[in-house]
Amino acid sequence: MNMPDILDTQLSPHFKLREFVRSAIAQAHGIDNTPPDDCLPLLKEFCVKILEPLREKFGAVFITSGYRCPQVNALAHGSPTSDHQWSPSHIAADCHFLHPLRNVFDWLRLESKLPFDQCILEFGKIPDTETDDCIHISYRVEPRRIALVGETHNRAGYDRVEVV
């Protein structure tokens, strides 16, 4: 299968692989950011069990960062153990919504009962706006349901918050 074909892989009714591999860093540096094929089953499950229910509740889900190959992850200053470096047992995506992120985050951790591994409400560098904020959602074969709040890239550490 060639690159354009694989990027058009339909993962669930509203999500395609293309949304998860888009990367300005990869494009700027000529890096192939295509995830390993063995990650696709878990990604499909993530889309069905986490993203589709979020979309049903809040409307459009915008993936701002999905898969990061090790090179892209390093250039993005991601943790060397980041779940953005997908494997058959863990994946992650940063998401944005048309609704206030705090409302989405609180519903996800307090009401949804969705099987996420971690959800992190991350605040960017631009104060008093959600422009560069996101909700990081990771998914694993055995989810822990952990919720955290903090600055993007763990600049000042994360605070753990309640999950119901």
Image (tube, rainbow, N blue to C red):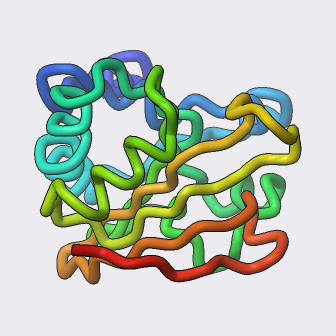
Q: Residue 99 occupies which quadrant of the picture? A: top left
Residue 160 percent location from the top left of the image: 52, 82
Q: In this rendering, would 34 be left or right of 141?
A: right
Residue 140 percent location from the top left of the image: 27, 72
Q: What residue sits 42% from the left and 72% below the top?
A: 147
In depth, the one of 14 and 18 nearer the eye is: 14
Q: In this rendering, would 64 be left or right of 137?
A: right
Residue 40 in sight here: no
Relative vertical location of residue 42 with respect to residue 7 in this rendering, above or below? below
In depth, the one of 127 and 21 nearer the eye is: 127
Q: In this rendering, would 75 be left or right of 47?
A: right
Quadrant where the image shows the N terminus: top left
Relative vertical location of residue 158 with respect to residue 25 in this rendering, above or below? below
Relative vertical location of residue 127 with respect to residue 146 in this rendering, above or below? above
Q: What residue sits 49% from the left and 68% below the top?
A: 83
Quadrant where the image shows the C terminus: bottom left
Q: What residue sits 78% from the left and 37% below the top?
A: 25
Residue 93 percent location from the top left of the image: 46, 49
In depth, the one of 75 and 100 nearer the eye is: 100
Q: How many numbered markers are drawn?
A: 0
Q: In this rendering, would 94 be left or right of 141?
A: right
In depth, the one of 90 and 53 nearer the eye is: 53
Residue 97 in sight here: yes
Q: What residue sits 41% from the left and 57% below the top?
A: 137
